[in-house]
Image (cartoon, rainbow, N blue to C red):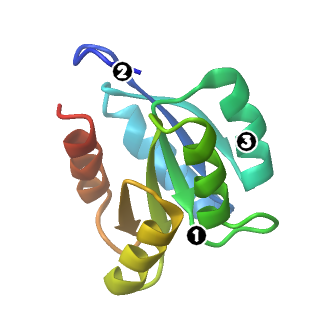
Amino acid sequence: MNRMKKDKIRTLVVDDSLFFQDAIKCFFESHPEIKLLGVMETGEDALEFIEKEKPDLIILDVRMSGMDGPQTARLIKGKYPWIKIIICTIWSENEAATYTAEAGADDYFVKGEPLPYLLKKIRVLFSC
């Protein structure tokens, strides 16, 4: 899918941490280029949501109950290769890079980093 620069980046967050969900919701509210479509807690719920909404970007936790992040990412990329995926983790940058590569995701974000760093990664992915 081609996205014009003026369009908002339609984003889905998939993470079972309520703290991270709340933090990212508040952060994205102050960045008008991001349209938060929803927040899911499981990969299974995300797959159903994606089928209907077709987001531009998914921010996906590595470890969740049920289907984990890498497995979810592989299923998404297999069906919707144009959807960008950023894997999120609390682990080290090296481990995050490994999970990202294994999952076929586009980038990663280590949760200990400031959220503006995540926004920078999103802007690079969408060249805005």
Give the Cα separation between the discs numbered 1 and 3: 15 Å
Residue at position x 47%, y 65% in the image:
88
Residue 1: name its quadrant. top left
The picture places residue 128, in percent across and down from the top left corner, at 17, 31
With 27 as the anchor, is 23 left or right in this view? right
Foreground pick, 90 / 77: 77
Within 10 Å of disc 2 (Cα), the crowding (few <14, some 14-19, many 20+) is: some
In this figure, what is the number of numbered marks? 3
Residue type highlighted by circle 2: Lys
Q: Is residue 18 above or below residue 119?
A: below
Residue 79: name its quadrant. top right
Q: Which type of secondary structure does the marked residue at label 1 adopt?
A: loop
Residue at position x 18%, y 34% in the image:
127
Which residue is tagged 1?
62
Q: Looking at the image, tell me whether mark 1 or mark 3 is earlier in sequence order.
A: 3
Which residue is tagged 2?
8
Q: Which type of secondary structure does the marked residue at label 2 adopt?
A: loop
Q: Looking at the image, tell me whether mark 2 or mark 3 is earlier in sequence order.
A: 2
Q: Which type of secondary structure does the marked residue at label 3 adopt?
A: helix
Residue type highlighted by circle 1: Val
Residue at position x 82%, y 66% in the image:
66
Give the Cα separation between the discs numbered 2 and 3: 21 Å
With 57 as the anchor, is 106 left or right in this view? left
Q: Looking at the image, tell me whether mark 1 or mark 2 is earlier in sequence order.
A: 2
With 96 as the anchor, is 120 left or right in this view? left
Q: From the viewer's perspective, is the residue at label 2 or at label 3 nearer?
A: 3
Return the mark for residue 47. 3
Residue type highlighted by circle 3: Leu
Are the residues flagged by discs 1 and 2 in contact, CB closer than 8 Å? no
